[in-house]
């Protein structure tokens, strides 16, 4: 495949890919999700993107651990766990993603837990506003809505809250607790669409309902089929809007992606996940993608096949979103 096959209406350098590998796990309590970027890279993902999909990669394969940003003392604040660490890591990440996106490159972020989307989406949103004077849309593919406010969250884990901070539903003035998020970083609630939901907390359901947020659950996918659901999701966004795709690997059924911190049965097949990514690529509107919540240390049974399968599934999703075509 050659670079001219990479579709993108909103990128000035469509053949270029900014890569940010984020080894961060502070948005939840299970260690191991910080090892995902290395596992994805070791399994050959970046080499495939370079040699098979012909991207010019920027930002090498160093995995950022942000050790200098993780404070020793980080007590809960408004019920959030590790609030200072998550805030300062996502603030730095936001600048990293912004610096790629402002050059008109596609940006790929390998997480890390889903709290890192506070950094990625804020960075792309700001760059798209500056470069194109436009609002971008987000397709959030996940078993979970991750739209708890600090107050509605039962767990206190920030990986269950990124969407509320990104849309301004949760606000905080103090810069060390996400107060660095300004209006140029934020996402419009009517430009957000969910696919794959099946484990949504009562407080989150209330938020989704009250704000009329477009959501396609597994029930909708069973009823209409993945083809129709993706068509409806894209119709909601409109065909003339840059898209940031944030893909939580737990959207896939644990059969395909068992190694993840909060698995939920009854999810997408790998093929359905790949189809979502292929369809988003086909719009030509994709500007950034996150792949999060792969946790290779949470393997199933006595072997690490689960981790291997999950990493492989993650690689497949990314390649599909970045233009790998079947024929
Ligand atoms: N990114 C994720 N896997 N999020 C899971 C969130 C689970 C639950 N809703 C919580 O707030 O803690
Ligand atoms: Mn999830
Ligand atoms: Mn998530």
Image (cartoon, helix red, strand yellow):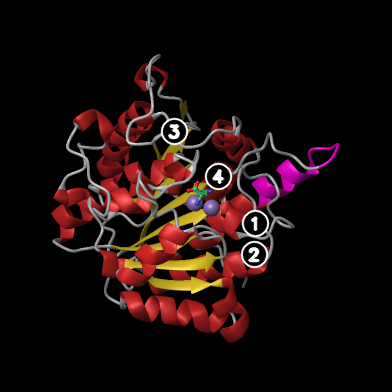
Q: Nearer the viewer, residue 142 or 327?
A: 142
Q: Is mark 4 within 8 Å of ligand 1?
A: yes
**Badge 1 density bin: few <14, some 14–19, many ≥20, Cα 10 Å:** some
Q: CA distance from mark 4 to mark 2?
A: 15 Å
Residue indicated by mark 2: 267
Looking at the image, residue 143 sits to the left or right of residue 138; the answer is: right
Q: Is mark 1 within 8 Å of ligand 2?
A: yes
Q: Nearer the viewer, residue 79 or 3?
A: 79
User: Which residue is farthest right?
Assistant: 302
Residue indicated by mark 4: 293
Residue 255, image x, y percentages: 74, 57
Task: Please say whether residue 9 is one of the residues in the magenta stretch.
Answer: no
SS type, badge 3: loop
Dominant SS of magenta comes to helix
Residue 292, image x, y percentages: 51, 46
Tell me where residue 246 sits by quadrant. bottom left
Name the quadrant of the C terminus.
Answer: bottom right
Residue 242, image x, y percentages: 29, 65
| Magenta span | 301-312
Residue 154 in sight: yes
Q: Nearer the viewer, residue 238 or 159?
A: 159
Which labelled disc corresponds to residue 264? Answer: 1
Residue drawn at x 57%, y 85% as measured from the top left: 224
Q: CA distance from mark 2 to mark 1?
A: 7 Å
Residue 322 in sight: no
Residue indicated by mark 3: 60
């Amino acid at each position: 495949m050659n670079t001219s096959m990479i579709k993108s209406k909103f990128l000035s350098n469509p053949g270029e890919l900014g890569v940010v590998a984020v080894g961060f796990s502070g948005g939840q309590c299970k260690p191991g999700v910080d090892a995902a970027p290395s596992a994805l890279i070791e399994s050959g993902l970046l080499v495939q993107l370079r040699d098979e999909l012909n991207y010019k990669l920027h930002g090498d394969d160093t995995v950022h651990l942000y050790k200098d940003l993780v404070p020793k003392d980080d007590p809960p604040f408004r019920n959030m766990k590790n609030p200072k660490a998550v805030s300062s890591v996502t603030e730095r990440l936001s600048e990293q993603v912004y610096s790629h996106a402002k050059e008109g490159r596609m940006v790929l972020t390998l997480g890390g837990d889903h709290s890192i989307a506070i950094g990625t989406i804020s960075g792309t949103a700001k760059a798209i506003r500056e470069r194109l004077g436009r609002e971008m849309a987000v397709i959030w593919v996940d078993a979970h809505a991750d739209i708890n406010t600090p107050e509605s969250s039962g767990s206190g884990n920030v990986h269950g809250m990124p969407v509320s901070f990104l849309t301004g539903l949760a606000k905080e003035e103090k810069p060390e607790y996400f107060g660095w998020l300004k209006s140029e970083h934020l996402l419009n609630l009517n430009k957000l669409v969910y696919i794959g939901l099946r484990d949504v907390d009562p407080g989150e359901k209330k938020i989704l309902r009250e704000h009329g947020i477009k959501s396609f659950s597994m029930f909708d996918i069973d009823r209409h089929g993945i083809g129709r659901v993706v068509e409806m999701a894209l119709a909601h966004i409109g065909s003339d809007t840059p898209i940031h795709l944030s893909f939580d690997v737990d959207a896939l059924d644990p059969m395909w992606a068992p190694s993840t911190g909060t698995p939920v049965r009854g999810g997408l097949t790998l093929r359905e996940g790949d189809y979502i990514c292929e369809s988003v690529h086909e719009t030509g509107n994709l500007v950034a993608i996150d792949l999060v919540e792969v946790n290779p240390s949470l393997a199933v049974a006595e072997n690490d096949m689960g981790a291997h399968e999950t990493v492989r599934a993650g690689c497949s999703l990314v390649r599909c979103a970045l233009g790998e075509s079947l024929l």
